[in-house]
Image (cartoon, coloured by chain):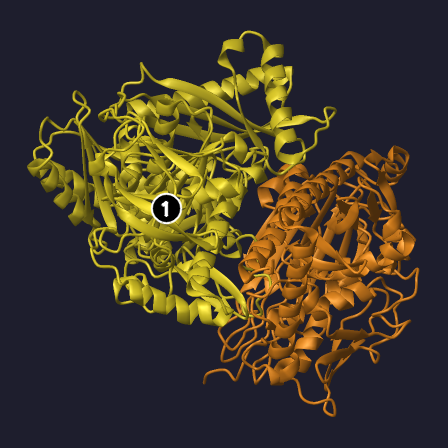
Chain colours: A yellow, B orange
Amino acid sequence: MRCGIDTGGTFTDIITVNNDTSKLYVKKIPSTPINPANVFKTALDYINKHSMDGQIDYLCHGTTVGINAVLQGNYDPIALLSTKNFTDILEIATQRRPHLYSLDSQYRKILVPKTARYPINERIAADGHIITNLDTNVESIFQDIKKKSIHSVAISFLNSYNNSSHEEIIAEQLEKIANKENYSLFISRSSDVCPIIREYNRTVTTVLNAIVTPKLKVYFKELENHILESNLGIPLRLMKSNAGVSTVEEVKNYGIHSLLGGLAGGVMAGEYVCKQLKIPNLITIDIGGTSCDVATLEKSQAKIRDHLIIGEYKAIVPSTEVETIGAGGGSIAKVNDGLLSVGPDSQGADPGPACYGKGSLATMTDANLVLGLLDPKNFAGKNNLLFDKSKRTIKENVANPLNLSIEEAALGIRRILNQNMSAAIYKITVMKGRNPHDYSLCGFGGAGPLHAVDLAQSLEIPETVIPPYPGLWSAFGMLVSDLKFDKIKTVLLELNQENLKELNDQMLSLQNELALHVTNQNLKIDKANITQIITVQYFGQGYSIAVKVDQSLKDDDKKVIDQIRKDFLEQHQSEYGWNDEQRIIQVVDIWINLVIPQPEVILPKISIGNTNPPKEAFIKKTTIYDNSQWFDAKIFKKDELLAGNKIKGPAIILQDDSTTYIPNSFVGSINEYGYILIREVNN
Amino acid sequence: MKLSPIDIQVINQNFIQIADQAGIVLQRSSFSPNIKERLDFSVGIYGILDNKPNLIGQAEHIPVHLGAMSESLKYIQNLFPFEDLKEGDVIITNDPYLGGTHLPDISLTRPVFYDDSLIAIVTNRAHHADVGGIIPGSMPAGEYTLEEEGVIISPRFIQRKHKLDKSFLSSFLSQVRSPEERKGDLNAQLASLAIASEKLKALYKRYTTKKINQAINFLGNRSRNAVITNFIEKLPSNSQPLSAIDYLDNDGVDDNSIEINVKIVRKKNNVVFDFSNSANQVKGNINATTAVVAAACFYTIRCLIPSSYATNFGLFENISIITREGSILNPKKPAGVAGGNVETSQRLVDVILKALAKKFPSQIPAASCGTMNNITIGSSNFTYYETIAGGHGASHNGSGITAHTHMTNTGNTPIEILESHYPIDVLEYSLIDGSGGQGYHTGGRGIRRSFKINSNDVKVSLLTERRKHAPYGIFGGKKGRKGINYLIKGSTKTILPSKTTFSINKGDKIIIETPGGGGYGKPKS
């Protein structure tokens, strides 16, 4: 049996699948934010008691412990060692103030205070040659760090992406002294964590790694103890930002890789949908209570970029290209001088939407309730939403100030939030030169299936796909992800035949480094797939485009170069709308990606029916307000629907973890695995 | 059917998105470090109402461009009546005396047609690394005429009915340094306008011109009313104008201080910024064009209005600005203006804020570093331009930070990018402790950035300020530390003037120390 445990801020989702019978077990339990490891133990207990029709042989976990530590500033102090005269790089940052039209900008949170930033006398030039020899004596710095009870150190010297020797020596020296004094010290070295040009980005990445890794180490130790106690006898696997799975061994040194692990599950679940339904291009939208994550997949594959954004920081580690905005069921609707805005602020789960009873502000969920899209007796584990309170709150906060009817106000809230979410999709499609019309849209998360069809309609996406377990679909993604590892390095070489040998040598050496990194984690790489990627730009530009190196062309230098050039020109044209074939092309970074495939997971098939849904599936009739008019609609029960059933909109399909809305003139078809595929009637 | 408030917000968000998207295309495919790393560019979208362009959306990183493109469009409309424009036309200009800022800022403007009628104008303005002239980087300091500063492009077509004017382009490129880079940047600017134009057409098609114009009117009124309630109504009645004086250090030719003088008068629901009493135009090239003066006024007002109001033409409607012809804020052609955009613009903000401080004590901070600390280093084969941040003035809400202030918000060139592109090593990049003015809240610290030059026959230009007159503190706060520039040749360290152009050689070093911000309130005892 394969098991995924996905811990979010409000709920922890548990999903288990039997490899032989394809039987699936799903469960949501409340998370324990104060001590996040507790819920993991509860989850293990639950698995032990309930889903046992087989032995668990694979356990994967997604967590937000790392990202929350950074966002909430809840971590132990660290030290930063920098080149002398450059210890303020972290604080000066990009020199830009956070808000253009603010007369009193406040300080961004400084990750390492001045008192814990130490200068090292050394200097390396851009071409890697040594300008100032290294002062190797770090005894007094070590003693100061020890006095301050700091147990984690980041080292980031100028131009170390091109010559790492000084950083390596300092790391060794510190390690030696720490060992001698039996003092635990974690060291994060920039030339190891991310040997990439641009000192501020590299330093931030290294510092973030020094911040989150010790915290995650403690957390994973606890989880491993829980696994030991429960006699599972299997290693713990973790989701990481690159939409792959990692080992605890890797995260013990490179915690930075697991920061977006909580978002990656959803993207991989999207990849699964692509492969199962044979959809090449898919947009995923995961809508929860406070935020909405969108991603695109092409050729049935997730988009991976070389960085992730966390709060006001950018870290250079491979990461799924996910756009997150503050939009969800709890998003607050407000009127200011005649204009309605919804989000990014959210009421979250506490106090929650007005209809939960505690809150007094109008939210998206209140609007959906007033519009007739939610069943007050069956929503997110609640069986008594306060319909009248939603109505009253929307009337006071939105309808009266805008001089609209309550229904129109509620519909307005929905339209504005949909506009915000479609802007997020627009950003990762149209603004990258991708036409949404060529994609399908997959909506999941608690609120995804309620909004997906509207979003598809506004962006002219022909088909909407609702997966069988939308509310737990991110957790499902963890079961279908492969183990994935990356290394990136800046090389700065002109793209030509002369440099090809140098480029190949560098890639081979980076590949060997990566292979060693993986085998050191007790993993076998004989079945691994390795991809070589280079990022290229016109000489003089500041943003490079990733291109795969076709290894089958290896022996023909000219073909290799031609293929890279062709791919680059195509992408440049599609993203920026121009090209100039006379210009020199420069290779900026090389990037090796290693994937160890995991066994396939097959969803169970559901029983076959005919076009009309069975009687048992029909719950009752209702009315729904959409498009400025009331419609008669039917409510169905998802569990009773059969493969082949067609549900004509307007209709609502209820299941424990989510509610799907099929608007008028759309029809939803249930397929053999329980997906709902929704299209406009005339299409 | 009547346009609902919901439609208006959706249309508004679309204007912003389209401008942003055009900005991203420009940034990511350009070559000038000023554009790609430092984001020294803007994109403006103008809806046509009654045959007049009205700003409806702006992607901006640089306040000095705020509203400035609106000035430029007035001149363009005079020279090229809108009825003569055709689909696929693009007009180019950088003339500071026709709504421009300074020569390196090149603006491209494109009409957008839908259903055969002109619906909108899209325009972008980007700071190119070099536009010719006698000094690399086209940002000399001292007594230079406009022609010596660089190539002047009077408004003209660079593209007519989709056809690029290649002879103009090659003639322009032959007059600048690194022509390949210029060509690439212009390509990026053209691509950016083409995308904005396509997106706008799709938007007008979805909503109809009539509905969009209704939305534009609503949004403009909303922003105009916000200016009245949040700014104009808080000013004293017209019998008691607010006024203030501050000084520029010098013009880079002689060392006389230069007075900038503002009088702010409310007339019912209108306000007049009167700069007539400011100094006469100067020999040095720190004269500011009227577009720059307007941008400084709009910036200040924009800061006092909540961010939930759209940046559009409504912000500017009840504001009038008076400058005296022949003064430093309304110079006569061909006076040099390279530094007016970057330095005089900062002093304009300082003086406007100083005049308003008593009426807006919880919103207005002490003086910020008051300079962009411009340094240009170049020779026949490279040009490097940078502006260095300084201290923010402390405010009612807290201490000042260190970052770019007021009229600029460009990023820095990463040291590793700089060192891999140019024969320059950076020796230091750090904060200057104690440089922020003392006060109940302390001003932000200045920065020290030092360079070593690894090449011979290199020209350096400095355009810096607040080397003589320190940034002021307010409500009892102390002044920030002044900035200072040094040159080191061998073992000799000399102080450099605040504005100067000079030659240096291999091994020479330059140290720039930028000013700290002023303090706010009496220091805690």
Residue B356 location, quadrant? bottom right
Q: Between residues B391 and A142, which one lies in front from this camera angle?
A: B391
- Image check: B33 left or right of A70? right
**Residue B459 visible in this rendered orientation of the protein:** no
- Image check: A575 left or right of B170? left
**Residue A166 visible in this rendered orientation of the protein:** yes
Residue B258 location, quadrant? bottom right
Q: Residue at x 50, y 50 (%)?
A: A419
Query: What secondary structure is marked by label 1?
Result: helix
- Disc 1 chain ID: A
Query: Are there few (<14), some (14-19), or many (20+) residues within 10 Å of tag 1?
Result: many
Which residue lies most toward the bottom here?
Answer: B239
Q: Residue at x 22, y 36 (%)?
A: A615
Q: How many marks?
A: 1
- Image check: A558 left or right of A521? right
Question: Image height check: is B398 above or below A328?
Answer: below
- x and y, in percent, of residue B345 in the image: 74, 66
- Image check: B38 left or right of A48? right
Residue type, label 1: Leu
Q: Between residues B362 and B372, which one lies in front from this camera angle?
A: B362
Q: Which residue is mark 1?
A: A450
Q: Between residues A506 and A116, which one lies in front from this camera angle?
A: A506
- x and y, in percent, of residue B385 in the image: 71, 49
- x and y, in percent, of residue B252 in the image: 82, 64
Q: Between residues A128 and A257, which one lies in front from this camera angle?
A: A257
- x and y, in percent, of residue B300 in the image: 66, 71
Quarter containing the N terminus of chain A: top left
Which residue lies most toward the top here?
Answer: A555
